[in-house]
Amino acid sequence: MAAGKGLVTMAIAETPSIRSALLDPQQLAAELGICKRTLDRWREKRRGPPRVVVGRKIFFRREAVEAWLRANEEKPEPAVARRGRPSITQTGKRVRRRA
């Protein structure tokens, strides 16, 4: 039986604590390089990463924050030719503007 207890103790010691996977608002703000108040505003507007509420405390799961960042990643768009009046350099003529 002693060997079995040792395995259980060792398995518990090797698993990361739940708390290590959670960030409080101050920690998240510091990691993202934003103000804690920004997180508060995002929460009011129902934006930002998903949060976990435990009692009166707010936490963010690191995994959920990373997924949120990936989902909100902006892809670069290809350059689009501008529409509108041709410029002087395109036609070689001066464009008359209406008053």
Image: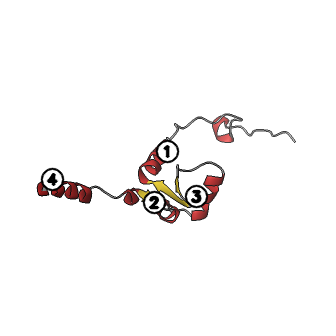
Q: Nearer the viewer, residue 72 or 82?
A: 72
Identify the mark at residue 23; answer none if there is no mark: 2
Q: Tag 3: Cα neighbours inside 10 Å, few (<14), some, or many (≥20)?
A: some
Q: In the picture, which quadrant includes the C terminus?
A: top right
Label 2, label 4: how far apart the Cα atoms are: 34 Å
Residue 45 horizontal side relative to residue 31, left or right? right
Name the residue beneath numbered marker 4: 4
Residue 50 image position (x, y, % from top left): 52, 49
Q: Which is nearer the N-term, disc 2 or disc 3?
A: 2
Name the residue beneath numbered marker 3: 39
Q: Nearer the viewer, residue 33 or 17?
A: 17
Label 2, label 3: how far apart the Cα atoms are: 12 Å
> Element at badge 4?
helix
Identify the mark at residue 73; answer none if there is no mark: 1
Front: mark 2 or 3:
2
The residue at 85%/39% (across/down) is: 98
> Element at badge 1?
loop
Q: Which residue type carries mark 4?
A: Gly
Q: Tag 4: Cα neighbours inside 10 Å, few (<14), some, or many (≥20)?
A: few
Front: mark 2 or 4:
4
- Above or below, 44 against 87 in this view is below
